Amino acid sequence: MLGVVVSRADDASVHIGEHLLDLADWDRLADRSRPDAEGGGVVYRTDDAVLREFDELHLHTERVADAFGDVDLLVFASKHAGETGPLLTAHHTGNLGPADHGGDPNDLARACPNAHARVLAALAEHAPEGYEVGMECTHHGPTDVGAPSMFVEVGSGQPEWDDPAAARAVARAIFGLRGVSPDCGSEDGRADGEAGPADAYRRHLVGI
């Protein structure tokens, strides 16, 4: 099961979430076991995917997988901020030193290298004209997620965060992760049970 985390404190995250909901027929469910601010309230579910909304900015969340229950992969739909121009990017989370932006110091969240490779390929396929696609290093929290996870982002400033074409590209890349294993299960980079030529899966697989 793919879990998608949308933060109401992040404009780009909200826009990506809206485009995700446009990509399929989602059932609207009510979860009264958790506060609305912590992923409860209205929950969206479709085949092999669940989307939950949180008030807090993603990088300050902890044990967010607990809100989803049995989830194989968590994706944080997010903005990217920096002096990098129009950019679609994905990265794992954690801190190789001090925890300046969420999470614990000297701690890393569990990576999802197979899903990471897949989403980068999908971002490259769907990127609007003028957008670069990149893979970032680990540089912020959360660290205690509870499942393999990554951030998938649109950047790098307000014009891009408000760009519907960029939000839709990220949404399509995230939606394509349904049923994708977070980890590679073989030396050639294929996930367990995955068919296809070995060289199609070897461009990059990075994780800890």
Image (spheres, rainbow, N blue to C red):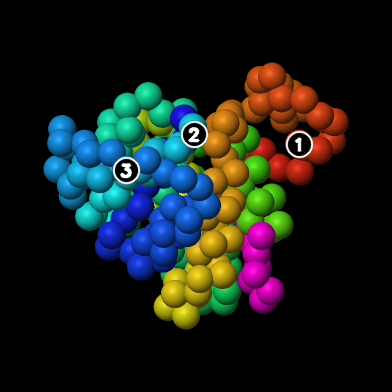
Q: Tags 3 and 1 in contact by the CB under 8 Å rule?
A: no
Going by the numbered disc 3, the residue's amino acid type is Arg
Residue 201, numbered label: 1
Front residue of 33 and 45: 45
Is residue 163 visible to us here?
yes
Helix, strand or loop status at disc 1: helix
Estimate how packed mark 2 is, as few (under 14), some (14 to 19) or many (20 or more) residues with alpha carbons within 10 Å.
Answer: few
The boundaries of the magenta stretch are 126-138
Pair 2/1: label in front: 2
Residue 4 position in % (x across, y down): 41, 44
Residue 126 position in % (x across, y down): 66, 60
Going by the numbered disc 2, the residue's amino acid type is Asp
Rendered residue at 22%/39% (across/down): 30
Residue 181 position in % (x across, y down): 58, 29
Residue 20 position in % (x across, y down): 47, 53
Estimate how packed mark 1 is, as few (under 14), some (14 to 19) or many (20 or more) residues with alpha carbons within 10 Å.
Answer: some
Helix, strand or loop status at disc 2: loop
Pair 3/1: label in front: 3
> Distance from label 3 to label 1 (Cα)?
36 Å
Helix, strand or loop status at disc 3: strand
Horizontal side, residue 5 vs residue 153: left or right: left
> Distance from label 2 to label 1 (Cα)?
25 Å
Horizontal side, residue 97 vs residue 31: left or right: right
Which residue is label 2 attached to?
47
Going by the numbered disc 1, the residue's amino acid type is Tyr
